[in-house]
Every structure is written in C-alpha cells, then in structure tokens.
Image (cartoon, rainbow, N blue to C red):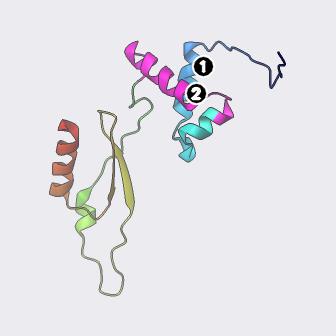
Amino acid sequence: MLGEVLGVERRRRWSEDEKLEILSEVGVRGASMTQVAQRHEITRSQIYGWRRELKEKGLWSPDRGAVFLPVDFGSCREPASASTPARSVPIELRLSNGRCLRFDSGIDEEALTRLIRAVETA
C-alpha cells in the first residue's frame, strides 16, 4: 500500500481567553468569520463551535464590547433646503437577541420602533 504525506497534522489547544480574543475579532474593521479563521489557521466551524460553547458557559455574549450611542431623531426631521436634498446614511443596529438590523437613516421613528419590536419577538 502506497501512501503520501500531504502535510503535518497538528492539534492545538486554545484557552478560553484565546478563544474569546479570536471571537471578538469578527466584525472588527469589517473582518468576516472566514477572514478571522484564515488568519488563525482554523476553520469557520471551529469558531462557531467555540461561540456556542462559550455562550453555554456564559462567557460570550453577542453584545460583548457593544457601544451604545444616543440617537436624536429630532435633528433628522429638520427640513432640508430646496437646493440640498437630505442625505441618508446606512445604519446597522445590533439587538439584544443577537440579530442585526440594517436600515436607512431616513426611516420614520415609529416604523423603526415597530420593526425593532417585530424582530425582537420573532
């Protein structure tokens, strides 16, 4: 029987702190799960497994490191002059249940409130 050695198999051990550090890199400066996994030479499924494991232990939360900023909807309602139309900006909102909403800054306050409530209860 002929065999071929394709690479060195290695098994690494990661501490919970190392796992948390790697998990927290996802989304920073737009880094995707795939990019973070490639950077650390691990698989995406390994990161998903760590996230599930650490959530069960109460060590990981989707809100970890979240920053909350005040939003003043009153300033969005100022009428724009006829020569300069109001400029809309995309906004991303992460909810407490881990879901993410993306919407335009021009959305009506009541519509946004209904949308958040609907997504939180779904």
Q: Are marks 2 and 1 in contact (CB under 8 Å)?
A: yes
Label 2: how many residues lie within 10 Å, few (<14), some (14-19) or many (20+)? some
Task: Say which quadrant the N terminus sits in.
Answer: top right
Q: Which residues are magenta?
A: 38-60
Amino acid at pointer 2:
Ile
Q: How far across and how far down the image is residue 43, in percent?
A: 60, 29
Q: Front-most of 41 and 86?
A: 41
In this picture, residue 96 sits left or right of residue 13: left
Q: How far across and how far down the image is residue 6, in percent?
A: 80, 26
In this picture, residue 98 sits left or right of residue 49: left
Against 12, residue 74 (above or below) is below
Task: Say which quadrant the C terminus sits in.
Answer: top left
Res 22 label: 2
Q: Front-most of 46 and 121?
A: 46
C-alpha distance separating marks 2 and 1 = 6 Å
* Label 2 SS: helix
Against 44, residue 80 (above or below) is below
